[in-house]
Amino acid sequence: MTAPWEIYADYTLRTVSLGSAALGLVSGALGAFAVLRRQSLLGDVVSHAALPGIVLAFMLTGAKAPLVLVTGAALAGWGAALLVMLVVGTTRIKTDTAMGLVLSSFFGLGLLLLSVVQRTAGAGQAGLDRFLFGQAAALVGDDLVTMAVLGIVVLVVLTLLWKEFKLLSFDPAFAGTLGLPVRALDVVLTSLLVLAIVTGLQAVGVVLMSAMIVAPAAAARQWTDRLGRLVLLSGAFGALAGLAGATISSLVPRLPTGPTIILAITAITLVSLLAAPRHGWLAGVLRAASQRRQAQADGVLADLYRLAAQHPDPTRAPHAVDVLRTMSDRAGVRTALRQLAAAGLAEADPDGRWRLTAAGAERGRVLAEGTP
Amino acid sequence: MSAAMLEIMAIAVVTAAGCAVVGTFLMLRRLAMLADAISHAILPGIVVAFFLTGNLSSPWLAIAAAATGVLTVALVEALTRTRRLREDAAMGLVFPALFSLGIVLIARQAGNVHLDVDAVLLGELAFAPFDRFAPGGVDLGPRHLWLMGGISLLDLLLVLVFYKELKLATFDPGLAASLGLAPVAIHYGLMTMVSLTAVGAFDAVGIVLVVALMVGPPAAAYLLTDRLGALLGLAVLLGTVAAALGLALATWLDASIAGCMAVGVGFVFLVVYLVAPGRGLLAELRRRRRQRWSFAEIMLTIHLLQHAGQPEEDDEARIDHLHGKHVGWTPDFTRTVVAGAVRRGLVVREGERLRLTDSGRVTAGRALSGSA
């Protein structure tokens, strides 16, 4: 029996997993800003649009060096983002339409070029198509170095301009009044996003990269309301998904890396949506149930007070549970009474009839009459 | 053009028509990115139905895929309703997850020659003519032509029958609801048609082209007309033109047909974007320049009016004075402005001096009183 982590003794698997984790970390951290700034789908545009850049870079240089391809991808991705802004800024076409248009034309161009290159360039082009769905297994030391450098650049800039980016994301108008160069900051932050996307393309592929931007941030958003924690957590989720996805896809035959990583991050997001404290679905259900119980208890307390108020001393007038049941059409009167007893607002006589305590009488009066 | 090319063109035309019809409403409802989301997300539905029936032309595929498409929309809306995710983030989360699921399912079932990852993205338009529709041994043409023709005809018929309802629900959902038109039913009906069109088109032309044909032609047509009927017609026409251009390009370059057609869509949009009367980039630039000149001409009339009848009028009304200390124009600029103002009858030239006409006085007065 070997320990599970011993699979990482394998050099290739370690390279691949580390690389994918690093990509997840960077795209997760930048994705937090993208989601806050409603640029979730811009990631989709940039990643699809990177394809023609990659193929063109290869056609022009004949090289498959990671830095060359990443530069091509970044330029094309940036161009696409600018084109979307230009079309939206100068026509009445809305952002969603402009994005769909630019995304599909650029991606079509990428596929066109890819089909030409595959036919004409011989064996030299082999591997370009791994940019479609990602092939982490093809990551080598060179790729890792490029990714590490780009990733560190992105994270360092993010740290240095943290305060500015925070302001830009939450209140750009206020940032402007403070004299911050809003437009330049916007350009820098969007550029970082483009860089984060193009570094991840090798592992996840252009088709699915947008999910690596959106999903970690969406998951992290369920756990916290603070930007610092959001970015850290989002990066951690991205890294975890990259690690898990790359490992699983390396171990299981015929499992493409990109989709596996995306399914991993989707699982993390689903768990977060369901189980996160405070914001999660489960927390919401529990909160609603507890509020319902509270309302029920308040209602029964008010009923008990109305009955008791007919007597000279409210705390000396016990009433049967059945009487209380007829006063409210809600179920769970007995549960509510037990809750009231636990809170010291009502108590049961030995014969099973209920009456108010002094505190219960006071609170019941407030509830029934509406004045403190 | 060979018979096969004609058949490919015919398939492309009916696909473009169906996509343009549903795409127009997607664009007007600002849901263009749903074309991207739905066309990706239907994949697992297609794959599962294919595994169950073992037949790519089974009608169950269309039904399963359409159901998956509607499910995607419902999921996005459910996630948005939790208010923990915005709509764009929800979309960016749901469709990559479903698409990944489809890709993983396909990859795990290697050996199924009919379904592979490239075909999903690119379609197999080049092979479409080999897939015949021959009931009882009588060859009636390519199967895809009948399939897509049928779906597009259905799109068209439904839009014609529910034209009024769709129009109202798109432009004024509030009024539509108050008239009892059930906007939700119309919305989901439209989404069903989008899914059905996507699944029909996907098999022949691939996801990329589905998105391009749904978003691009309506966007280009939107720059040319304000009327819904003309918008639909123009979108179909431009989609057809784009498909024909793409096919010619693909033949010339011997490249991916779907990729080339998507590029054709981008090209058609670019041309319309540049030269569209009134709304194109050139018209916009011309308008902005005209505004600059007309503003300068108004400034000129105001300047002359201010000094009319004053002792310094002689001096101030001289042309060379305008590019002196008071107005600060350059000599060239002044010359053009004066020529324009003379041509429009705002001023008359008397040697080196300018005099306001009645019309110029009115123009200046109006500008000063703020009721342009």
Image: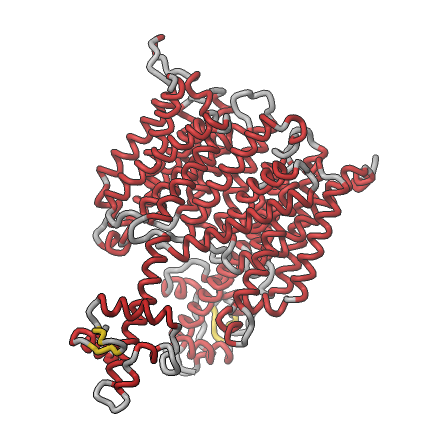
Residue furthest to the left in view is B358
Residue A312, compared with residue A152, is above or below; it is: below
Name the residue: 21% across, 88% down. Answer: B309
Name the residue: 42% across, 68% down. Answer: A299
Q: Position of residue A106 (x, y in %)?
A: 50, 42
Residue A240, compared with residue A355, is above or below; it is: above
Residue furthest to the top in view is B137
Name the residue: 35% across, 62% down. Answer: B289
Residue B326, compared with residue B283, is above or below; it is: below
* B37 vs B49, nearest the viewer: B37
Which of the image's four quarters has the C terminus of chain B? bottom left
Which of the image's four quarters has the N terminus of chain B? top left
Left or right of residue A351: residue B10: left
* A117 vs A217, nearest the viewer: A117
Q: Position of residue A331 (x, y in %)?
A: 42, 58
Residue B363, compared with residue A153, is above or below; it is: below
Q: Position of residue B230 (x, y in %)?
A: 24, 43
* B150 vs B241, nearest the viewer: B241
